Amino acid sequence: MLTDQVTQPKLFISYAHADGKSAVDAFWAMLQPFLNGPERRWAKWDDREILVGSDWDRTIIQVLEKECNCCIMLLSDLFAKSSYILDKEWPKTLLRNEQQGVLFFPVVFGVLEGGLAALPTGMMRFQVYWPTVTDLYVPPPANVSNPD
């Protein structure tokens, strides 16, 4: 049911900046060998792809609406508190899932102290990958007051 707009698999990575870009890079490095093979190469997209001088909000929305055919959402306390994720990225991802069947994968990426109740509205009906607490325990930085 996917449209022909995307010919190469392209993965949008949604994450809270405050969780750290190096952790996202490490996650991508771990995931890449499972996605890429001789027949298919996956590209990734995250907000570091936005060119200087571009309208960052418009760019993110365009990528979510048209350019990516899969989304990984790296869930954490900071993710669950990000107004941009809750108000923009998650609704666009959910809409594409419902209208076009675009896949997304919610992965608990850091401490999620509120449990499933901390997830964005509507996400609780989807299966979430939730590693063990010892696999994930990296407390969010104490000096971060705003996850955006």
Image (tube, grey):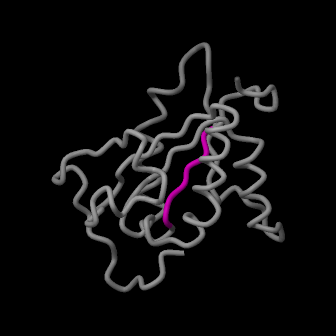
Identify the residue shown where x is 44% and y is 53%. Answer: 74
Q: In the picture shown, does residue 55 fall above or below 66?
A: below
Q: Nearer the viewer, residue 34 or 70?
A: 70
- Residue 127 lies, in percent from the top left, at 38, 39
From the viewer's perspective, tell me whether residue 100 is left or right of residue 106. Answer: right
Check residue 22 for magenta coloring: no
Quarter of the image that includes the N terminus: top right
Residue 14 covered by magenta stretch: yes
Residue 141 appears in which quarter of the rendering? Answer: bottom left
**Frontmost residue, 83 versus 41:** 83
Q: What range is drawn magenta here?
A: 11-16
Return the x and y of residue 32 as percentages of the image width and height: 49, 34
Residue 136: horizontal and vertical position, in percent?
A: 25, 54
**Which quarter of the picture shows residue 116?**
bottom left
Please, what is the dominant secondary structure of the magenta stretch? Answer: strand
126 versus 8 height, above or below: below
Q: Residue at x 69, y 40 (%)?
A: 68
Farthest-out residue, top: 39
Q: Quadrant of the C terminus?
A: bottom right
- Count the marks: how many? 0
For residue 83, side relative to residue 55 (left or right) = left
55 with respect to 135 (left or right): right
> x%, y% of residue 107?
39, 46
Q: What residue is at 25 percent from the left and 45 percent from the top?
A: 131
Q: Is residue 90 above or below residue 56?
A: above
- Residue furthest to the left in view is 134
Q: Between residues 126 and 66, which one lies in front from this camera angle?
A: 126
Asked which quadrant contains residue 125, the reply is top left
